[in-house]
Image (cartoon, rainbow, N blue to C red):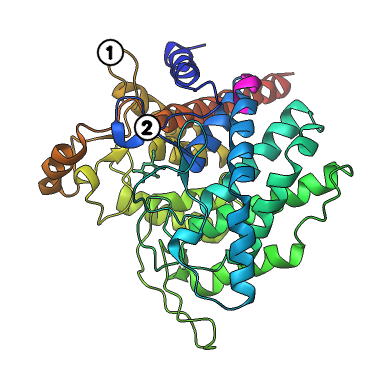
């Protein structure tokens, strides 16, 4: 194991609370919570390195949180049925305290992607460990999550960067798609949980909805605006720009295959607009958060895409770039600030919340994922090399 891999595992495990929650970043007070989004990728990375107990503890933490707030989903469905106005405070939160409670104070909480992502991570865990009986333990929170996603998948909500609440986002739609597809798999694996998974019809609808409204100039766009479901008019594409989170539409959510021309063209645009040559990856061009730096987890994500599509050289290049960003104690930050998109905003954020989050557990998790996919790929290549040598 290389030392940054070992260090990443150690940093993640030592920052997992007894409750199973992963703190987003221990040295950055604003991130002293556990996000469903970050946590699910972290749990997946723990499964890849064989730390299944850590992943399992995280799933128990989510399960308890969802059970605790399941009444909110019931109330939302009732209100939706009666066509009553839904308030932002009615929806489930995007992050919880380490003990699994809603955090006090205002936050941009209505974000659906994490609820799809946890179902994806859980189904990966079960397939890897073969612990099918877990599905019975988690049955009620799986069902509640599915009800929630089915009822609200086409509602505008905050994107994965916790911005743009009036838009819909292909990344979020893909996370929901993947969560529902995972629930379908779960329903097929376990006949004991007495659960009819979501229909393939709804999956096709989400996918088609994204194609109809979230594509411009041959690629997926960052976000689009709904016009109101009652009008049958076409939903206009709000912006024709991309966001690096669109990589997630293919990996891991697989709403489109990485080889799909739509994904290829989307990633080509991400490369030309957001990948600094020999450097890292920005979120989107207008990013001003901490001046809009290069995000390590996005560099790993692009590397993951390259590795899965056979471009090992570029995947390894990104892995090395991430390794070069680790500081003396082997911490990987959220972003690095040497080549900012909007430098004038950096100071404002630093004054407000302190230096950039470091370590960010999600950065370590994505590094582990990239490392694993490169390792697997080079093993496969070695085998094929020796075969062709015979
Ligand atoms: C990011 C989110 C992330 C959270 C915790 C926010 O700044 O936009 O994607 O979940 O930090 O890491």
Nearer to me, 325 or 69: 69
* Ligand 1 in which quarter: top left
Q: Position of residue 241 (x, y in %)?
A: 35, 63
Which residue is located at x 68 percent, y 59 percent?
147
**Quadrant placement of the C terminus:** top right
Residue 305, x across and y down, in percent: 51, 42
Residue 380 in percent (x, y) is at: 66, 26
On the image, numbered disc 2 is attached to which residue?
Answer: 32
- Which-is-in-front pick, marks 1 and 2? 2
Q: Which residue is mark 1?
A: 328
Q: Residues within 10 Å of mark 1 (few under 14, many from 20)?
A: few
Residue 163 visible in the shown view: yes
Say if residue 258 shows up in the picture. Answer: no
Foreground of the two, 100 or 286 = 100
Residue 388 in magenta? no
Task: Say which of 320 and 116 sits in front.
Answer: 116
Q: Earlier in the sequence, mark 1 or mark 2?
A: 2
Q: Name the residue rendered at 52%, 11% in the picture.
A: 1
Magenta-tinted stretch: 50-55
Q: Residue furthest right?
A: 191
Whether residue 190 sits left or right of residue 321 in the image: it is: right
In this rendering, would 346 be left or right of 379? left
Name the spot of residue 138 as percent of width and height, x first: 72, 39
Secondary structure character of the magenta stretch overall? helix
């Amino acid at each position: 194991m290389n030392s940054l891999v070992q260090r990443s595992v150690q940093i993640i495990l030592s920052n997992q609370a007894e409750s199973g929650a992963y703190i987003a970043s221990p040295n950055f007070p604003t991130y002293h919570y556990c996000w469903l989004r970050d946590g699910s990728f972290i749990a997946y990375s723990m499964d890849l390195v064989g730390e299944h107990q850590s992943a399992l503890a995280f799933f128990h933490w989510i399960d308890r949180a969802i059970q605790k707030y399941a009444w909110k989903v019931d109330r939302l469905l009732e209100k939706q049925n009666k066509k009553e106005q839904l308030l932002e405070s009615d929806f489930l939160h995007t992050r919880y305290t380490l003990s699994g409670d809603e955090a006090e104070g205002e936050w941009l909480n209505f974000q659906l992607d994490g609820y799809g992502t946890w179902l994806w991570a859980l189904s990966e865990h079960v397939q890897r460990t073969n612990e099918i009986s877990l599905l019975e333990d988690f049955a009620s929170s799986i069902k509640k999550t599915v009800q929630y996603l089915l009822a609200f998948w086409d509602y505008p909500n905050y994107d994965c960067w916790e911005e743009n609440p009036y838009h819909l986002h292909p990344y979020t739609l893909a996370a929901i798609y993947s969560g529902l597809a995972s629930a379908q798999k779960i329903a097929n694996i376990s006949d004991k949980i007495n659960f009819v998974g979501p229909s393939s019809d709804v999956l096709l609808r989400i996918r088609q909805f994204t194609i109809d409204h979230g594509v411009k100039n041959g690629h997926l766009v960052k976000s689009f605006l709904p016009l109101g479901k009652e009008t049958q008019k076409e939903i206009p594409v709000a912006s024709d720009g991309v966001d690096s989170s669109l990589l997630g539409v293919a990996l891991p959510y697989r709403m489109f295959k990485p080889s799909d021309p739509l994904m290829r063209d989307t990633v080509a645009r991400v490369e030309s607009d957001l990948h600094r040559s020999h450097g890292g990856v920005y979120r989107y061009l207008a990013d001003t958060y901490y001046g809009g730096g290069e995000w390590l987890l996005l560099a790993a994500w692009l590397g993951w895409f390259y590795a899965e599509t056979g471009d090992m050289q570029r995947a390894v290049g990104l892995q090395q770039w991430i390794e070069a960003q680790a500081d003396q104690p082997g911490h990987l930050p959220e972003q690095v600030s040497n080549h900012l998109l909007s430098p004038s905003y950096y100071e404002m954020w630093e004054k407000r919340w302190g230096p950039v989050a470091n370590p960010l557990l999600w950065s370590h998790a994505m590094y582990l994922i990239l490392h694993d996919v490169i390792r697997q790929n080079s093993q496969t290549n070695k085998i094929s090399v020796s075969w062709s040598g015979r």
